[in-house]
Image (cartoon, helix red, strand yellow):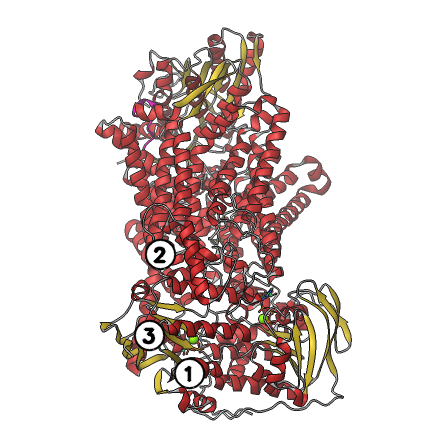
Amino acid sequence: MTTTPAFEPNAPTPGTGTSWRERLWPRGGSGSGENLRLLALIILAYIVIVTFQSPDFLSLASLFDLIRTGSALTIVALGVLVVMVTGGIDVSFLANAILSAWIATALSNALGIDSLAFALTIAIGIGTFVGLVNGLIIYLFSLPTLITTLAMQGVLQGVLMVFLGARPITAGFMPSSLRDFGTSVLFEIPAGPGFTGLSVFAIPLVIVIVLTWYLLNRTPIGRASYALGSNPLGAVRSGVEVLKINLVVYGYAGALSGLTGLMMVSEIRLVNPVSLVGNELIVLAAVVIGGAKLTGGTGSVGGVVLGMALITLLSNTLVTLGLSASWNRFFIGAAMVAIAAISHYRAKQRNLKLLNFQDV
Amino acid sequence: MAELIRLEGLSKRYIATQALDHVDLSIAAGEVLCIAGTNGSGKSTLMKCICGAEEPDSGNIVFDGHAYKRLSPSQAMRLGIQIIYQDLAIFPDLTVAENIAFHEIQHRKGLWLDWKACRKTAEDALASLGAKLPLDARLGDLSFGAKQTTAIARALTQECRLLIMDEPTSALPARDVEQLLTMVRRLKERGISVIFVSHKLDEVFEIADRIYVLRDGKEVGEYAPADIDVSELGFLMTGVRVVAGKSDEVKADAPVLLEVRDLQRDGQYRDLSFALRAGEVLGFAGLTGSGRTETALSLFGLNPAKSGRVLVDGAELRITSPQDAVRAGIVLVSEDRASQGLFGRKPIRMNIASSIYERIKGALSLISSDKEATIGDEWVTKVRVKTPSASEPVQSLSGGNQQKVVLAKWLATEPKILILDNPTAGIDVGSKAEIHEIVQTLAREGCGVIMISDDLDELAMSCSRVLVFRTGRIVEEFSGPEITSGRIAATIRQDD
Amino acid sequence: QPKKFEIVMCAKQEGISWFDDMRTGVEDFAKDFGVNAYQIAPETGDPAKQAQMVESLIAKNVDAILVVPNDPKSMEPVLQKAKDAGIVIVSHEAKSLAGTADYDVEAFKNEDFGALMFDKLAKAMNGEGKFVAIVGALTMETHMQWFNAGMEHIKADYPEMEFVLSEPIEDNNDEKTALDKVNEVLKRYPDLKGIVGCSVSGTSMAALAVEKLRRKDIAVVGLGLPSINGPYLEDGYQNVALCWRPADAGYASAFVAYKLLNGETVEAGMDLKRPGYDSVTIEDGVVYGDATLILTAENWKDYKF
Amino acid sequence: MADTTPSHVAPSSKRPGWQARLNEEFLAEVVLYGIAAIVLALIALRLGGAFFNSTNLVSVLEQVPEFALFSLAMAIAMITGGIDLSVIAVADLSAIFAAYIMTNPSIVDVLGPGGAIALATIVALGASALMGLFNGIIIARFGVPALVTTLGTMLLYFGLASGLTGGVGITGMPSAFTDILTLKLGPIPVSFCGLAVLFVLASFYIRNSLFGKTLYLYGDNKVAALFTGLPINRAIIISYALSGLLAGAAGLIMLARFNSMKVGFGDTFLLQAILVAVLAGMDPYGGRGRLLNVLAAVLLLQCVENAFTIEGLSPYAKKMIWGGLLLIFMALNFFVRRIVRRSLTRAALRAG
Ligand SMILES: Nc1ncnc2c1ncn2[C@@H]1O[C@H](COP(=O)(O)OP(=O)(O)OP(=O)(O)O)[C@@H](O)[C@H]1O
Ligand SMILES: Nc1ncnc2c1ncn2[C@@H]1O[C@H](COP(=O)(O)OP(=O)(O)OP(=O)(O)O)[C@@H](O)[C@H]1O
Ligand SMILES: [Mg+2]
Ligand SMILES: [Mg+2]
């Protein structure tokens, strides 16, 4: 039997390339590669503008700053990405982060254990547990994920404030290992009259980037997550165990929330139980700017990193540009609407040509 | 031959319908069993019970001598039962290779996915089917045939002892069907049993070792293909004798309803010129990709042509949206009724009335629910939709009845020009005849009908004129007695 | 038996230590005077929610409402409504409400506090060099009053000092924002010599950023709490912290309301039974105490809030 | 032609009427009102007359308008399977425009206070409708999912508002404007009467008009809506414009209530509006839910809120209870649907 042209792609198919590499940096095709290029271009242009204003900006020190300020949220954003790949969404992550961080710190104090490893274990453990609960109830009652995690956000804050009676833990009462974690550097380089260093946060950041990439691209669960987001019914019929995926995906996002929580409190040396919550939308914005679709099946680690880099850059150069912070949200919003509009519009046009009317 | 699977007294009830009623059935290794039955007779439900997607209310599934009350999807898969659904469980965002090697990826051991091995698996699976596909293309960008080949190839990557195909051909054009049947024969040679469900009875006769007939969830009987013929099978399925009727001649002086001149859209079709008269059923024949659906969508305002003219009742029209088309009296019963034609969770009557809201709206654009109900009930009776009530959600209907709802929805608009894109794909012989009857009645009342179909017999029977499309052009026109499926087939395939 | 008065403090926000301390003051007052006094607050600093809470208190017909408004102006209508319903209103940290509320209670005159704060900064910088200031937001009345009074003081008495930005930095009272902004400023102005914070978050994060650079030569002065800023004072990365005790402010506000409920008048020189409020002054409906607390490495451990 | 005997059944009353009514929409209503009854009973037990007195109940009615409008805006977006995260930002920005106009001395001089109020109202409502329109265009024309679009425009509109005002509040509206909230019809605030009428009309209109049915059908299957020739793009764009308009109205009410406006006023309402819409039975996936229930859910939650303030309980306890209620609601919905489906099947089996 010979092959028939009917099995050929409709047009020279874009988006060919080894799929694994594609997930980190997709080349064209379903639009995500285009999206990443667009994003990289915007970041470059922005860096040029800032450098024009302040020539010192183009330096290793700026990169170090970017890593220090952006790493915690990038980590949690990668967790959100993993959830979004399956077609879900999680908005309870920051409530989870502060809950985990508070319990970890309070427990360290109560037991008199001054060890970063202990605090990390507790925080990540609690974060994972909360994530697993999310995944479980979403699966059991087949609930819409946005609403469930939104409700969960309220429950977590309530648990923290009412049941645990959480009160801020200030620098003086923080285990010193945790206090130091936020300020430690891997190495230092001279900068101005002082010096600047590469924050230790670079280590968890790199680990999580690699781990997330590995999870999404090199494990059965990761591939099944893309499958689930791509065609939920089909995935179930192909024997994908949705419960298992939900648990792994929400558990992983929860674990990263715990890690992020601990990083954030150690960075500011204050465990404030009412902080963090409310910044979820910025993280979601980063993930979406990075090209993940809410309907699932798409999204890449590289996209999230770039998306978060752009948002961190936008808010961290306002003083340098002499702009009032009031305009910060405006720029993030404008970037988000523009990027989303361009990439979705192109995808829509492409699909209409293929007579696919799904995103009318 | 050794028995592979036996069903004993399988029953399944949905709220209002007894979908399966004590079904007994047995399949031997390497046997191709075709299941025939009208829409809603319970074929898909039976398949779902075997592969674990549905839980039977009572009865046993005996596989390899072990009896199971029910199977879970993964359990069924482990036993070697693979199913290819009508709507294919493929993943548009993954590549072809990943889709094919999906099970291998899911069950691999070790820490690192061996991408090369996966590609090899995919290549081998495709080769054993004699097919070739771009392994790294995103599957969502490929044609339906490619998706189906991918799905079959995937089923073969696992130990497969029973392959269930639920209406694999209803969305495939003739040439791909042949390829599919060849694949099935290869599987059979390898000792794999196949359950094949199809409404295209000629295929059933071509491929089946045994035909199992189901009616209203009950077994009618098992037959060897040699013992019965197509019309006998149709009778067994429906309980009535279906007599094919021929369309009427159209008077040459009937007014021209639609005239298309030099219509063109790059990459899809070009130089299209034809006319449609009142009372005429005009057939479009051709292969997939020959541009028929594209043309239909253009006339319906969803795929605007780049150049050319469309005249309705002699007046030139620019149709850029379905609203324009409906207003001009052009309606389209599209290929994919589930996703393009129906609001699954909404009541039948709302589905039917949805097309004429514009017309029945009163002051302030209000729509009286009484009017909606009256219209819905009226059409449910007229096209004889099988349902307990017109307020049932339309997704509870079987395929044929859903298609009737789509037809009713458009007939309610009293269209001047009705375009049907494969209107009877996946529809049983009984309903098919009813749909054909509706179409003929409509033509007799002065409506112009364009019928796109991959079923050449259907074209030959229903049409007074047939245009043959090849690579985006009209290459031939047949009319009256010239129209035979053989001649059309020959023209379609020229210089192939 | 006389009616047990119900006095409710509606604070800015639940769950922050500042208002937790204030709650202890309100509850102490309840114990001392045998009234039903307690504190509520919305979960976020949304003025809309705070106004709703006051609405509910009006419907409950409490005797007195004490309020630390998130946005004084937005509370005016609802407080007026409360007053029309015969409820005693005492505000805190909202001088602009003095006309609406029966009295506004302040720990000190903001002008004095601001001048004192910036004077401490100037002293720490030896009267010369570049500095920046941080406020919660440019729209925060109190912070801006401190900043403006402080700047005037600097202009008048320390001509060698240079404010390098056109306006103070905003941190939205969020530590992470404050830290990122301070870092950015320190990078932009390597020769910066001082940072003054009008928000607790701003001051503490300035100290933290300076500690990271191990630059004890940069002066950090500003609003601070013993629990938060203590360690920085201890380690020498913050020079001076100024504040007032929220518990005392809560106690004093409740006291003023109690006096009014009992039909007594509030007059200058009276004693509200709390340190710094032992002889208050009154000006245009505002009750001023003299309750500034100056925290240093030596004394911060004496306070527990 | 085909000679077929109709084995088909004409629409008949084979299934009793009450069974046909047992659709998912109806079941969600049963669960909602069941929960409402239980919650109100608990409040009655705990607080009794302290809660159920006319002053307090009127106070509840006085407090709901802006919250109810936000929830209505959210619910309309949910009918189409969308969501509108920008409602608060739209409300704040348009109220800021209104505040600028009403407090601008030269405008007041020329038009008089009444004229300035009228102009401010028109501008604010117009601006909010335009912002909603922009959302709708991005969603309908560019095919960007509603969540992404409105998340972006939320940041955009908030950013614009804080950029324009520098974050400063604007105060001092004319008293004729702020007085609208104090008007009463007997004991009932006029604002609530207007709200109730709006909900009844909106609920009826959306269920019985071409526009509304288009939204519901779009929410059920948007591709089919396109292929049916329904005016979907127009309907989507109008629905978001309408959401914007409702948000703008809520903004004006907040402006009147606070006699001042500043970026961020009311931002706690955002998540609450989503929760209320879902609690009211709006299907977040689209196509189902009755708007009138939204008013009931808003009142229920305002009662809970009020009861909490009266009890002097932590707002975090309330947040937890809201979240918990919602999870319970959704889980109950799930179980009720399953139980009903099962028992119907069983009943059918028994009937043969
Ligand atoms: N999920 C469901 N809920 C209620 N009724 C259902 C459901 N699925 C199927 N049915 C009903 O069960 C009967 C059998 O349906 P089934 O899909 O098995 O028919 P079929 O023989 O495959 O028809 P077709 O040829 O149209 O595919 C039909 O009357 C159908 O309406
Ligand atoms: N062999 C092929 N080469 C290029 N494109 C193809 C081929 N087969 C199918 N396609 C494309 O796949 C898409 C969907 O196929 P579809 O069956 O709808 O085409 P079609 O022209 O409408 O065929 P038909 O007229 O049989 O319905 C079309 O855009 C068509 O161009
Ligand atoms: Mg079927
Ligand atoms: Mg076609």
CA separation, marks 3 and 1? 27 Å
Q: Of C252 and A156, which appears nearest the observer?
A: A156
Q: Circle 2 sits on which residue?
A: A242
Q: Circle 1 sits on which residue?
A: B37
Find the magenta span and give its range. Answer: A167-175
Crowding near pointer 2: few (<14 within 10 Å), some, many (20+)?
some
Which amino acid is tagged 2? Val
Q: Circle 3 sits on which residue?
A: D344
CA separation, marks 3 and 2? 28 Å
Q: Residue at left 45%, top 37%?
A: A74
Examine the rendered structure and indicate whether residue B249 appears above or below residue B151: below
The number of numbered discs placed on residues in the rendered structure image is 3
Q: Nearer the viewer, mark 3 or mark 2?
A: 2
Report if residue B238 is visible in the image. Answer: yes
Chain letter for mark 2, please.
A
Q: Is mark 3 within 8 Å of ligand 1?
A: no
Q: Do the residues at pointers 3 and 1 share their chain?
A: no
Q: Of B290 and B293, which appears nearest the observer?
A: B290
Callout 3: helix, strand or loop? helix
Residue A221 has which mark? none
Left or right: residue A230 compared with residue A50: left
